[in-house]
Image: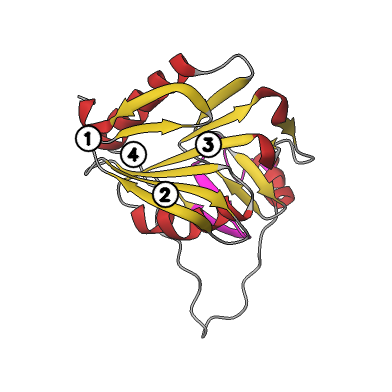
Amino acid sequence: MNLAFAPAADEFPPRRAFSVGDVRRMIDAGVLSEDERVELVEGDFVMMAAKGYAHEIVKNALNITIVRSLPDDMNMSVEMSVQFADNTILEPVLVVFRKSALIESEANFCKIDPAGLSLAIEVAYSSLAYDKGLKARLYARYGVQEFWVIDANERVTWVHTGPSNDGWSSIVERGPSDTLTTPALPNFSMRLDAIS
């Protein structure tokens, strides 16, 4: 999952903020691999950590359950690089969106019309503070309709709904034995304590 993002200290000289276009040029020039695990967060690169066992178990169970409950007009992707702005590319662990909302950006990345991005899920191990903090604010700012942060070890989920400029009108904590549901997927129902 993602490592925590730390802004530069005040005593450092100004840094150069990168754009999505810069990232595309780096990929085209071979400076970055298209499979390299990085996010671009408001112009800064954030390196993604290797995923552990608990993360993979939860991600795989969610993936299977979501795929089985997708309506015909919806799609889902695992670890899709999504361009949200000219300086922000995030890679949610899972994302559920209307098929018609997926478009190609000018820099050849995936973009999803915010009204069509129904659910983004981050499965956290070492990145819980980053996912519940900065990434939650970004997903709200860019209009993701619902956002979940799942603690892979404790199997606790924070369900964020009602996005606004930099926050959520509701954040509800669900325990491992609580049933997770979402309006995006009427046939989806899952308890994280049932994952083995």
Q: Secondary structure at mark 4?
A: loop
- What distance separates the C-alpha of mark 3 from that of mark 2? 18 Å
The residue to which callout 2 is attached is 2
**Can the viewer see residue 19?**
yes
Disc 3/disc 1 C-alpha distance (Å) = 21 Å
- Label 3, residues with CA under 10 Å away: few <14, some 14-19, many ≥20: many
Visual colour scheme: secondary structure
Category of crowding for the residue at label 4, using alpha-carbon neighbours closer than 10 angstroms: few (below 14), some (14–19), many (at least 20): some
Q: Nearer the viewer, mark 1 or mark 2?
A: 1
Give whichever of discs 2 and 4 has the lower sequence position: 2
Label ID, residue 119: 3
Write down the region rendered in magenta: 29-46
Q: Amino acid at mark 3?
A: Leu
Q: Residue at x 52, y 83 (%)?
A: 10
Let me know if residue 64 is in the magenta part: no
User: Which of the two residues, 167 or 16, is positioned nearer the viewer here?
Assistant: 167
> Residue drawn 75% across and 38% down?
105
Label 1: which residue? 177
